[in-house]
Image: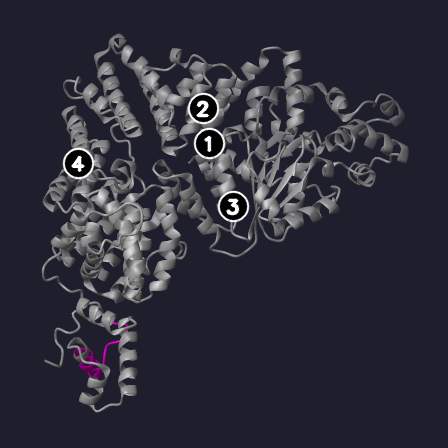
Amino acid sequence: MLHHSIMLKTKTAMPAVRSNSVHRSRLLQKMDAGLQCRLTTLYAPAGYGKTTLLSQWAHQYGGTTVWLSLDEMDNDLIRFWRYIVFTLSESDFTELSERMEPAMKATSHTSIFTFIDSLLNELASTTQPLAIILDDYHVISDETIHNSLAYFVEYVPSHVHLYIASRNTLPFSTVKWNVRHEVCHIESGQFLFSHQETDSFYRQVHDLPLTQMQIEQLVKSTEGWIAGLQLAAISLVNMENYDQFFAGFTGSHRNISEYLFHEVIMRLPEEERSFLLKTSVLARMDAHVCHALTGLPQCQQMLTRLHRQNIFLIPLDDYGTWYRYHHLFADFLRSQLEQTAPGEARELHRLASESYAERGLIDEAIDHAIAAADYPLAVRLLEQHTQVLLQRGEFSSFLRTLDSIPDHVNYFSPLFRLIYTFLLITCVQIDRAEVALTELEQNIPFIEDSTEHRQFLSGLFFVRANLVFATMDFDRWIASSSQLSGGLPESPLFYHFNYNTTEPFIRRTRFGLKGILSEQTEVVGNQFSAILEANGWKDSLINMYVVQALAEGFYEENRLEESLDYLQRVRFVALHKQIPGLLVPYVLTSAKLKLVEGNFVAARKIVSETVEMLASWGASYWFSPLQAFLAHIAIQEGDIALAKTELSKLPPSILNQPSIQRELEVLTYVRLLLAQQQEQEALRILTILKPSSIREELLISQVDIAILQALAHQQCGNKKEALTFLHEALLIGGNNCYVRSFLDEGTAMSHLLHDYQLRLKKRSQPPGPSVSAAYVNQLLSLFPKKMEKRKAPLIEPLTGKEMIILSMLAKGASNKMIADELGNTLGTVKVYLHRIYGKLGVTNRTQALLKAQEISLLENSPVD
């Protein structure tokens, strides 16, 4: 896997600190002050010691520290956050990568902010101080990364602190954190060595007995610039006559760096000098790739020797295996290479590409092939690893790599041009995708091989289909697809492309239009599927997901027979092709149909069997939604104890840190809380989830959350609030043909809808959009005339005396009448009523009677 690669470990390894390095107490105190802030920034040009300070502080800090060195290849939103998760998982957050991977994959249909919410929840699971260090942030230019990191900083838990080093100020605003004294800045002027620090540097680190006058000259000439002082030290180490050096040491540090670099390498033996120049093309290096470029047999010894000589070689791991040159030194070496051996860099890049490819380090191999301008090699590597590159989900990085190949049309095969167009669509570069598609269609007549021609048409068909969901221009796609004739072959790459790796219902994805339902979407969905099937794509995953989305839509619209018919079309592929993202939605929708019939046994059976099946596949991610649905079935049956048992099998983090990514599990827990009369905790969780559902434009989630908020307030006796939240749900439901979302709530929803109906008759809707009375009437007409009551157990059963009092309440008896009938005082009757209300989880007699009716408590009353 990419995120466990050797190269990634070099990016997350904290740089070592030399035992004799200068202790910069004033800057270390500033770093400590950052522990009182959410963010600490280190701004300074190259060579000012940002990385050294960060590593020095990190090694002495007592809390947990994680490190990520950034480079230009990290300008991909998914890769950036995947790397941050990886570096966290290398510390105290073990297995975090595995836990967060489903949320990362879900970014195909949710925003990155939902992923970040999940990550923040993980970080909130502990209160141990944590420092996250991002080095070289100036290489990041992607605006979406800047926005996402700003969001992360804004909501980061108080025990988490970010330290960001950059050559430039951050590209997102820190003003609000400055105002709140939540950010600490360390700027370039503060990094410069003082006279005392310079003296310590030469005596303590390099054992150079310089005079105070020489120290002053160094400070003046370098202006305290650390890289310049280091270069001077390297030059002085092997000199007997310091005065000769200082005589030629003039000018400011902006002019002396090249002079000093030249002095350093010219004093090295030819073999070492040649090694430095040839390996300068490498961003990271080990002995293996160095041997490929230099031909030297003892490259490991060479690397170790250069590091000991302080030749600006930085170790990237704890084993002395991987290194990189200091950025300034690398730039100098590359310019020297170009001057002394023009054109050799290309050949060196090609050798590096081949060396990395041999070891499966594909990213590095591709980068060096492009740097070598060996575009046929780069494209060959890309084509060989397309499947893996697509599975990562780092689409913008993949696209940027392809765009870096000039005149790529000359190098890409027709199939690879389809992949390129697919990436344009996925990265929402629709105009470019339209142009690319037009060019592809113009080239169809020039594909002479019949097999290749049909494969190309099959891939083109798939890419067009994806463009439909990006543009919602269904009419044009249907018109163009009608021109196809005959079956298209199963494109190995596209036919089984899996769109769902996280969601228990397809209606939550873009194939389900995130809950949008209408006659038009149904017509389009059916036409879309018909064209897919007519062209040989009946069992393709894209078709199965469309059919499954339609089945779920029919269920919501209470068209249960049609839902069942469509599920039968999905059944074979869902059961036999081992695609959990299709199987789980199929199973849960089938189980819902069984629940409508009141067949709890069948519903539980189909879900339990699926849990066992997925266990044999090793698809552990899906256990949680299935387990939650088993708890949902138990709640429907009224078996609260069983529901608690089922939910106890979920990882605690799912319920402790509510996330829209785990909505099925969280809302099932909310239902359990309501069944246990814990309305306030239920409302707290719903309040956390709601903003995410709105941000992600998940209509289905917004309705479910609003309905549960309404029911929670109804249980609390807050009728006004209950009707307000019901109004929210009805507004969305009325515009999208929602039915089952309301019917499945049973008696409690029926009562609430009746109250809402009375409000409509009084014309007392809230200001803003109105709900159709016809829609409310339709919903009420669909509830069974005599609804089956759910026999939910009470927190504590009523005693015989309490049952008698409850029965008398049902007959309209006043407190005085009950007291007279039972021979008790009014005070005693009030005590009994208080106990009854507590056991029922209500606050007054009206709520008590509604609750008793809902759970069939009075059917076997001891009083006639």
Q: Residue at x 74, y 44 (%)?
A: 24
- Distance between mark 2 and mark 1 Cα atoms: 9 Å
Point out the tag, 3 or 1, that comes first from the N-terminus.
Answer: 1
Q: Nearer the viewer, mark 2 or mark 4?
A: 4
Q: Quadrant of the N terminus?
A: top left
Residue behind mark 2:
400
Q: Earlier in the sequence, mark 3 or mark 2?
A: 3
Q: Is residue 79 above or below residue 462?
A: below
> Is 290 on the left or on the right of 627, as rendered?
right
Element carrying mark 1: loop
Residue on which disc 3 sits: 154
Task: Name the residue type under label 3.
Answer: Glu
Q: CA distance from mark 3 to mark 2?
A: 29 Å
Which quadrant of the structure image shows residue 791? bottom left
Q: Amino acid at mark 4?
A: Glu
On the image, numbered disc 4 is attached to which residue?
519
Mark 3, secondary structure of its residue: helix
